[in-house]
Amino acid sequence: MSGNSPAARGLKSSWILISALLISLLSISSAATLIRLARAPALSIAAYRMVLAAAMLWIVYPLFRFKFKSVPWKPVIVAGSFLALHFALWISSLESTSVASSLVLVTMNPVIVALGSTFYLKERPSGSIIAGTAVSIVGCLILIIGEGNLSAQSWTGNLLALGGAVAMSFYMLTGRKIRSRVDLYCYITLLYSVSGILLVVFCKMCKVPLMGFTNRTWLYFLLIALIPQIVGHSVINWTLKYMHASFLAVVILLEPLVGSVLAYWVLREGVTVYTLIGGILILGGVAGVFLTGQYGSGELTVE
């Protein structure tokens, strides 16, 4: 097989996408642990996650010089609003439930995304994606039931996490449409800026403090903005141009497993046999989708 043949280029593109997704997964999975370590109000963490991420991107703006005239402002604002809502709800959920349960519920969005991809994006998910999603969702249910967080005191956190999942689904569906027309750097810079501004407004409306934190907390704010946001979510936004939104939602189901392991290692939150069984099913569902290779939605190019 020639190195310049269509098959070879396709294989190389697939490995680039898979590698990018792995980096993104590891990055976004660190968020819950870093958020717990920050020891600040949920809305404050959410606001600084987006504001600092946007600031970092604007600092290097002169290297890219994107054009505002070609930006579809309405969908960018809509996507930024859903992203802000996602972080406000999900980060708040971590105050009332475990890392594992929160991550499981906030990533229970494949069904929503699959339906949205079918009716909104006209991208009907393949049988392998549907089957992989079903297996992974069973794994998620086993994990959350085994964690014992269906008690009354955890329902607030669980419902907030589910709300975050719905917001993330609409964010991904909106972003999938925009990314085919807008440069990545332009998109994420404006997206994070819109989201950050809205979250600061939320903080002001709810009288949540934005100052008075320790140096250690400021360091965690910076790490949250850099690792899970700049690296993790930006790479996800890059892959949205080349992969079905429904497939990406299945891959993100791995976050509860990786996040639970990180929480056990850093925060000493217990990992039960249910976590392991659920994790194996999640991995199996995602692996089934990968093995079919039916996840692309466009030819890969480097921006």
Image: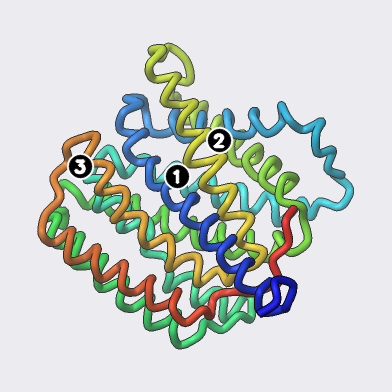
**Mark sitting earlier along the chain (2/1):** 1
Closer to us: 242 or 66: 242
- From mark 3 to mark 2, how far is it between C-alphas? 26 Å
Q: Residue at x 27, y 53 (%)?
A: 158
Q: Is residue 252 above or below residue 9?
A: above
Q: Which mark is residue 27?
A: 1
Looking at the picture, which amino acid does disc 2 mark?
Answer: Met
Can you say which quadrant of the picture contains the N terminus? Answer: bottom right
**Mark sitting earlier along the chain (3/1):** 1
Looking at the picture, which amino acid does disc 3 mark?
Answer: Tyr
Circles 3 and 1: CB atoms closer than 8 Å: no
Q: Residue at x 43, y 78 (%)?
A: 291
Q: Which element type, helix, strand or loop, lies under badge 3? A: helix
Q: Which element type, helix, strand or loop, lies under badge 2? A: helix
Residue marked by disc 3: 264
**Mark sitting earlier along the chain (3/2):** 2
Q: Position of residue 39 (x, y in %)?
A: 32, 25
Q: Residue at x 43, y 33 (%)?
A: 43
Residue marked by disc 2: 50
